[in-house]
Image (cartoon, helix red, strand yellow):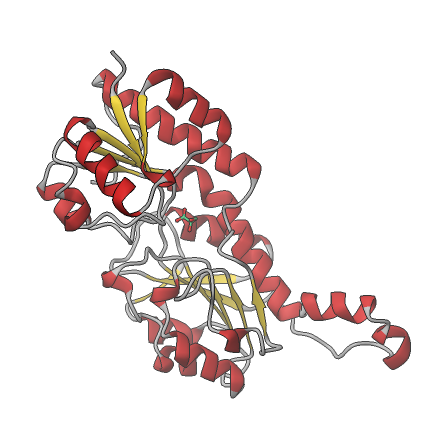
Amino acid sequence: MKPDVIVAYPLRPHQMAMLEETYTLHRLDLVKGEERDALLQQAGPISSALVCNGHVTIDEALLSKLPALKLAACSSAGYDQMDLEAMTRRGIKLTNTSEVLCDDVADMALLLMLAARRRLPEGDRYVRSGDWGQKGMMPLTTSTSGKKAGIVGLGRIGMAIAKRCEAVGLTIGYYGRTKKAGNDFAYFDAPVKLADWADILIVATPGGPSTEGLISADVLNALGPTGSFINIARGTVVDEPALIKALQERRIASAGIDVYLNEPNPDPRFAALDNVVLYPHHASGTEETRDRMAQLTVDNLAAFFAGRPLLTPVN
Ligand code: DGY
């Protein structure tokens, strides 16, 4: 008999085929309304595992319909839409995939940083529109090498960003709740102190209530009019209206943003700004990384059903 597994968000086609072969799948991702209620009523009491990603909300309301659940295998790094405390209380384990996506996400942080400071989208438009021929050289941009990068959250992704920042000649400082051993980066015990020191502030914390609004108007003011702000974490980590105002008023110089409060329809004021580079929450969006994330999710499920230790447990 194949074990029952609820799919709340699909994996890549190859890994979906693997799941289909091994488990009886209940496709919550394909139904809505009454059909969804019916599926939960039928599959909830018999499914001990659920496949999801960071876009899936797992709250008390859903958990109450999943009385047999023991594993949520999440195919993303972030799990800020999940009530981890309630899951732990109910004995439900969560796994995630931050281990396999940190290189692409860190690459994106660097890409946004350099693109914002060198005004890459503007340069691209300058060539395509013929402005180069009509108006001459575009205005000068801002150097990165020799400056200071402040990383908010020196976890796995933050470390991958730090490594890349060092390679482009930046000095690294960081803020975290605690000082981390094993590096000689400058430690700051408050985001505002880090921002005051840094030329570039890069956010790499988890989302969720513990980091909500961590990057406040005060932090952005401390970064100052020559500073760049980069966010590949979650939109909730920054006071977004304060960020937009700081960019409009040039109280910070530039920003590179992958994540927003209102996805996939971010505040339209972002699009009107010429000092921000925007990306559609796609830092881990490469074929290779999405395959690795899906495979790790499949492997965590296999470990769970075989009674082996989970590969990447969160709780
Ligand atoms: C993650 O894995 O959390 C990334 O933000 C992609 O969703």
Give the vertical position of 214 relative to 87 (above or below). below
Q: Is residue 163 left or right of residue 111?
A: left
Is residue 165 visible in this depiction of the protein? Answer: no
Quadrant of the drawing holding the N terminus: top left
Q: Nearer the viewer, residue 137 or 48?
A: 48
Q: Residue furthest left?
A: 89
Q: Residue furthest top?
A: 1
Q: Residue furthest right?
A: 133
Q: Residue at x 58, y 78 (%)?
A: 273
The picture places residue 128, in percent across and down from the top left corner, at 81, 66
Is residue 48 visible in this depiction of the protein? Answer: yes
The picture places residue 276, in percent across and down from the top left corner, at 57, 72
Q: Is residue 301 left or right of residue 117?
A: left
The picture places residue 99, in percent across and down from the top left corner, at 40, 38
Quadrant of the drawing holding the C terminus: top left
Q: Residue furthest front?
A: 34
Q: Is residue 77 left or right of residue 84?
A: right
Q: Nearer the viewer, residue 252 or 264?
A: 264
Q: Nearer the viewer, residue 16 or 231?
A: 16
The picture places residue 169, in percent across and down from the top left corner, at 59, 59
Give the vertical position of 77 relative to 142 (above or below). above
Q: Residue at x 45, y 22 (%)?
A: 17
What number of labels is visible? 0
